[in-house]
Image (cartoon, helix red, strand yellow):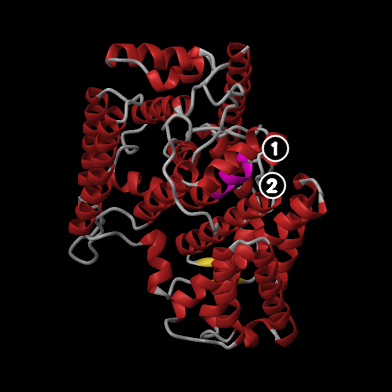
Amino acid sequence: MTTEQSSEASGSSATAGAPTSTSPASPTGEGLADSDFSRDAGPAGLSAYIIDWWQRVRGGEVGALPAILGLVVLGLIFTVASDRFLSVANLANLVQQAGITVFIAMGLVFILLLGEIDLALGTASGVCAAIMGLTLQKNGDLQAALGTTTFWIVVAFLVLGAVVAALSRLWYAVGIIGVGALLMAFQIQTDKQIVAIFLAIAVGVAMGIFTGLLVARVGIPSFVVTLALFLGWQGVLLQFIGNGAAISTGNFPLVNGISNGNMPPLWGWVFYLVTVGGYILYTVMRSIRRRTEGLSAEPMSLVVARGAVLAAVGAIALALLNQERGPNPSVVSIKGAPYVLPIIIVFMIFWGVIQTKTRFGRYVYATGGNAEAARRAGIDLSRIRIACFAIGSGMAAIGGIAQASRLGSIPSDAGGGNTLLYAVAAAVIGGTSLFGGRGRARDAVIGGLVIAMIPNGLGLLPSLPASANFIITAGVLLLAAGVDAISRRRAGASAR
């Protein structure tokens, strides 16, 4: 959805958050303070690195640490409270429950990085899912499903979205929306399910393009724009499927398998080796290369230890998920990691690379950290904002698809209720700042697991009232927001 070419950042810490300003320097280097290159010097050993990390935490750079601690604490509490919490079936169910929240939250992270908000992502996910469902139900004939007038309005919406994206030089968005418009207008059918999924994503990206246009070009505050669209997309969903109706998706194996299907155990191990092995290899080579170039690098002992922990945790989790968990294996065998898990991991890696290893990602952090400074540096703020809203709505479409897969249907209130609120909570709990300039795609995954774990664990404790879910989630969100505010204040104080 962006046009910038991938390029590696000069320092891993510099790409993890908003760029920081440095003192002006003369060509000879006069005027530079010693502290300007303090991060390049870096701690020399493991103990020095741990001390440096702890000082940064005390200074306000807490990252995802509170969310990880919350995940551990909640896990221990629910494990003690119910012996079913750590059962294989419940662990698989927890991943499936987290799907829609994590997908929407990953897109929302880009918007929050700008210091903006999108309240319409929940209902937008429902509209996109409805497009997919109607395409499936009518064998690709959306004109029959929507009616001629509504059908051509949607086609025109996609075409205009592609035009706006082209004017903003967002060529990936142009490609996605343009192909979607062609598939829809000419009723092109190759694989009905793949076409339906692609159309849902194309509509989602187009929604984000128009949201970003109203915010970035027209200048309407994002809160007002997305509040209006929250209501508007809800009306569009009702127009598509009617009051009280639901579109069934359970008879379509590809769509149904996204949230309900499981990877064969062998393919699960292949995916594990590729992702974990690739991560370990990358971090080791990065550390070696940075040391060779005379830059700061994490101690090799830390890199190896972290890789070993990740490999062990991943292997244990996958071994558990590969166990048989079907109530009657002789009739139906259920084992393997849910397909939604590798999909989440792939998107987390992809968006993490975009955020930390590309020019576009650095522009996003710069815009959220100090928009005026970014503008003076030559960054096209409108283009960055439109792109981020397009990413947010595109990921909302994927979240709607995952939810439709899990439920086996698309109800008339799809994406409504607390869908968006839980996504915001997931991003913030994971460590993304509401003030902009700080956050990662992984924050959405960690926070989404925390959000999903609360109703999952409480559901195993029938003695607790239903109100406990909302009260505990509210408390966790307030705690996360408080940590964010305090950490920013301490970081500002230490910078002075």
| Position of residue 51 measured from the top left corner of the image (x, y, whole percent) | 37, 11
Task: State yes or no: residue 3 in magenta.
Answer: no
Determine the residue positioned at 29% across, 53% down: 337
109 drawn magenta? yes
Q: Amino acid at mark 1?
A: Ala
> Picture coordinates of residue 463 (x, y %)?
48, 33
**Residue bearing mark 2:** 381
Q: Is residue 414 visible?
A: no
Nearer-the-camera pick, 312 or 350: 350
In-front residue for pair 344/61: 61
Magenta: predominant secondary structure element? helix
Q: Secondary structure at mark 2?
A: helix
In the image: residue 460, left or right of residue 170: left
Nearer-the-camera pick, 205 or 327: 205
Secondary structure found at label 1: helix
* Residue interval drawn in magenta: 107-113
Q: Going 28% across and 27% down the picture, which residue do you hit?
A: 291
Q: Determine whether 202 is above or below 278 in the image.
A: below
Mark 1 or mark 2, which is nearer the start of the sequence?
1
Q: Is residue 101 visible?
A: yes
* Residue under pointer 1: 371
What crowding class fits label 2: few (fewer than 14 Cα within 10 Å), some (14-19), or many (20 or more)? many
Q: CA distance from mark 2 to mark 1?
A: 7 Å
Q: Check the image and report above or below for 243 versus 496.
A: below
Q: Position of residue 23 (x, y in %)?
A: 60, 21
| Label 1 crowd bin: few (<14), some (14–19), many (20+), radius 10 Å | some
